[in-house]
Image (cartoon, grey):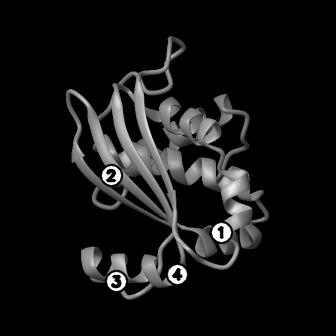
Amino acid sequence: MAEGVGSGGALPPLALALQFGRFAGATTQRKLLKPARVRRWVSFALARPGEISVRVVGEQEGRALNLQYRRKDYATNVLTFDYAQEPVVMADLVLCGPVVEREAREQGKTLEAHYAHLLVHGVLHAQGWDHETDERDALAMEALEILLLAALGFANPY
């Protein structure tokens, strides 16, 4: 598991690529997800230097990727493709904009808060955190997400 995530010291170096697919509402989400904002959220969840690509896609692309890589035929909120954890965290995060927007509305959250949560969540996955196979790991990951988001100024996402 990652240690030192969100420590009080300087944030680790981050090479960030931010991309947007074409979908209804992409312009609004692009305005919200300014590179500096995304960089802060991603960096805050990193325990070591990172090379992270974040791509925000529509439902068609999100569904196709989820089907191809997870064999699940629906668009999910965030997919993490992790390639290396040390010495540099290397990963692609794919967020499905329409799903994120719908979930935020259904959960009574701001779109900003939900994106912050999902980016922190995805970065933790890229560092080896897993909530699907071990309940203790799931509880530890959830607790860390709550702490990181609080430090970023967001309420408990759960």
Query: Cα distance, mark 2 to mark 4?
Result: 24 Å
Q: Which residue is mark 3?
A: 72
Amino acid found under the numbered disc labelled 3: Lys
Say which mark, if any, is on residue 145: none
Of residues 152 and 29, which is closer to you in this image? Answer: 29
For image coordinates 77% across by 57% down, the residue present is 110
Say which mark, if any, is on residue 59: 4
Residue 68 sits in quarter: bottom left
Q: Residues within 10 Å of mark 4 (few under 14, many from 20)?
A: many
Cβ atoms under marks 4 and 1 closer than 8 Å: no
Say which mark, if any, is on residue 26: 1
Say which mark, if any, is on residue 130: 2
Amino acid found under the numbered disc labelled 1: Ala
For image coordinates 73% across by 34% down, the residue present is 153
Q: Which circle's residue, 3 or 2, is located before the other in the chain?
A: 3
Of residues 41 and 35, which is closer to you in this image? Answer: 35
| Coordinates of residue 154 in the picture (x, y in percent) | 72, 40
For image coordinates 68% across by 75% down, the residue present is 102
Q: Nearer the viewer, mark 3 or mark 2?
A: 3
